[in-house]
Image (cartoon, rainbow, N blue to C red):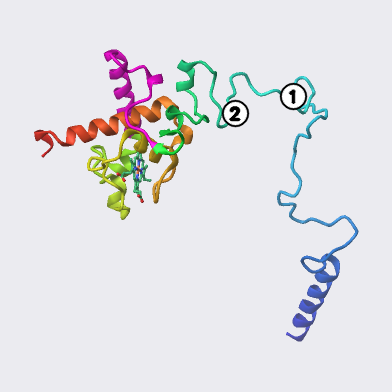
Amino acid sequence: MRYFFLSYLLVIVFVISVFGFRGDKFKQTPIRVFPDMDDQDRINPQSANDFFRNDMGSQKPVDHTVPFGHTLSPDAKSELSGYGNKTTYLHTGLIDGVNYGTGFPEELELKNDLENQTAFLTRGKEVFGYKCAICHGESGDGKGIVSEYGFNTVASLTTSTLGEGNIYYVLNKGRGLMGQMGSDMTLYDRWATVAYVKALQEASKTEAAK
Ligand code: HEC
């Protein structure tokens, strides 16, 4: 047994003398038993790289790439399919950057266009279904599936008295326990969801809902 402890001690002394203590500084190239992810392939900007067919490290962005926070193109139709970084009502839900607005932005071209309105609400229903119903419930009463798992402080949307701009703002930027949801929704989808929330409010007032 004595020899065991002695040899054990020698092994420890040997290991420490070869590898040193953790955090020690030394000049030689370290011996790395487990390299972890210390070295990785990478592309240096402005330098040659044979990974790409044109042997250049720096590549142009893929066609139709939209930088985060930018709209697709300046004309109105595709502005709606962009993600919005302007300060207008369409983008923020705010008038003059401070007050919550009411009603829907003109850019949506909903006025007197029944076909457009129907498509708009249909889309709103779809988006609400996969984005909001999990918390707010299919009918907007605040009793989505999460309430069965203890998250039961979700606001009811049917009893909410917020105007369109304010609903948009909460959707876009989040509030309290609700995270912001706008960043991956197009402007069109955000407003369509607002319209559907309004529709749910109206529906909850009907006799059938009582
Ligand atoms: C992760 C759960 C969750 C999801 C998903 C969610 N919400 Fe909420 N929402 C909440 C909670 C919680 C509150 C209460 C926030 C607070 O004031 O603390 C809230 C509040 C709101 C309010 C304010 C209501 C009022 O009158 O005060 C609106 C409007 C709203 N949500 C809209 C939406 C819309 C639209 C979506 C889908 C795009 C959505 N929410 C998705 C959890 C969620």
The span shown in magenta is: 100-129
Image-based side of 11 in relation to 100, left or right: right
Helix, strand or loop for disc 2: loop
Sooner in the amino-acid sequence: mark 2 or mark 1: 1
Helix, strand or loop for disc 1: loop
Q: Which quadrant: the C terminus?
A: top left
Query: Which residue is label 2 attached to?
Result: 67
Query: Which residue is label 1 attached to?
Result: 52
Kind of residue at disc 1: Phe
Q: Position of residue 49 (x, y in %)?
A: 80, 28
Crowding at mark 2 (Cα within 10 Å: few <14, some 14-19, many 20+)? few
Q: Position of residue 177 (x, y in %)?
A: 39, 51
Q: Is residue 86 above or below residue 42?
A: above
Q: Residue at x 29, y 19 (%)?
A: 117
Give the label on residue 73, or none.
Answer: none
Choose between 6 and 167: the one closer to the eye.
167
Q: Position of residue 26 (x, y in %)?
A: 88, 62
Q: Is residue 6 visible?
A: yes
Image-based side of 52 in relation to 177, left or right: right
Alpha-carbon span between mark 2 and mark 1: 22 Å
Image-based side of 69 in relation to 108, left or right: right
Q: Is mark 1 within 8 Å of ligand 1?
A: no
